[in-house]
Amino acid sequence: MKKAARATLALLALLVIAGVISCKPDIKKELMTGDIIFQTLPGELSEAISAITGSPLSHCGMVIKKDDNALSVIEAVGPVRIVPLDDFIASGIDSRFTVVRFIDADQLDFDDIISEARKFLGRPYDYLYRFDDENIYCSELLYKAFYNSAKIKIAKLVKLKELDYKARLGFIKSITGGKVPLEREMVTPVDIYTSDKFNEIFTNYY
């Protein structure tokens, strides 16, 4: 009987521990307008971005929280669009995502920042990663939303030659017509993620 009792207690303990581990706080309730959410999209382009930047964070968008607490994400994925948060998360590999928040979030007018981002709605995706307004890629959208609204540079700009471009040299040439624009400046998702302007508030990557 004692052995059976001990076995039962051990099983109950394991179930309790498992329950505690699985019952994580619902991060969705804590999200705010202006939070930046990262994920890993499937596909060759995402794989190239991850290889070249050295990070699984290949895509990003900005959270929008409405008065009724409905959550959506504005993203530049071709075209720039607004999608429900759940759809955004589900589109990533294994539904993994990471969220960061601007350190001095209470000092910014995020309605204005979102308004700036909305100005790019419908713009096609920029496969050439040029820093103009004709076509827009994901991290460029966020950078310009902050800068155009509050003159804040949320991350450093890097040149292609500073990245591990050789890891996907063939892919780069396939979308540029054989050119390798080493001097082209761009902003990458991981440079926003690692920027000292933000704190990580959630991740389920580990």
Image (tube, rainbow, N blue to C red):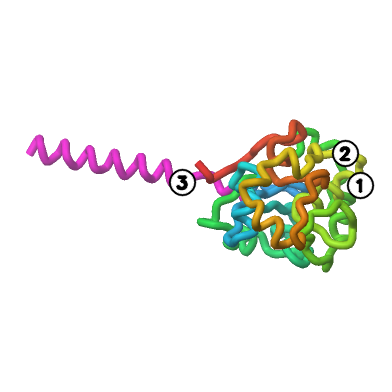
Badge 1 amino acid: Ser
Which element is circle 2 on? loop
Q: Which residue is farthest left?
A: 1
Indicate the quadrant where residue 82 lies. bottom right
Q: Residue at x 82, y 47 (%)?
A: 184
- Mark 1 = which residue? 149
Q: Which residues are magenta?
A: 1-28
Q: Nearer the viewer, mark 3 or mark 2?
A: 2
Q: Which mark is residue 23?
A: 3
Q: What is the x, y in percent for residue 171?
A: 66, 58
Toward the viewer: 171 or 76? 171
Badge 2 amino acid: Ile
Q: Residue at x 69, y 36 (%)?
A: 194
- Mark 2 = which residue? 152
Q: Residues within 10 Å of mark 2 (few under 14, many from 20)?
A: few
Q: What is the x, y in percent for residue 129?
A: 79, 54
Q: Residue at x 91, y 42 (%)?
A: 150
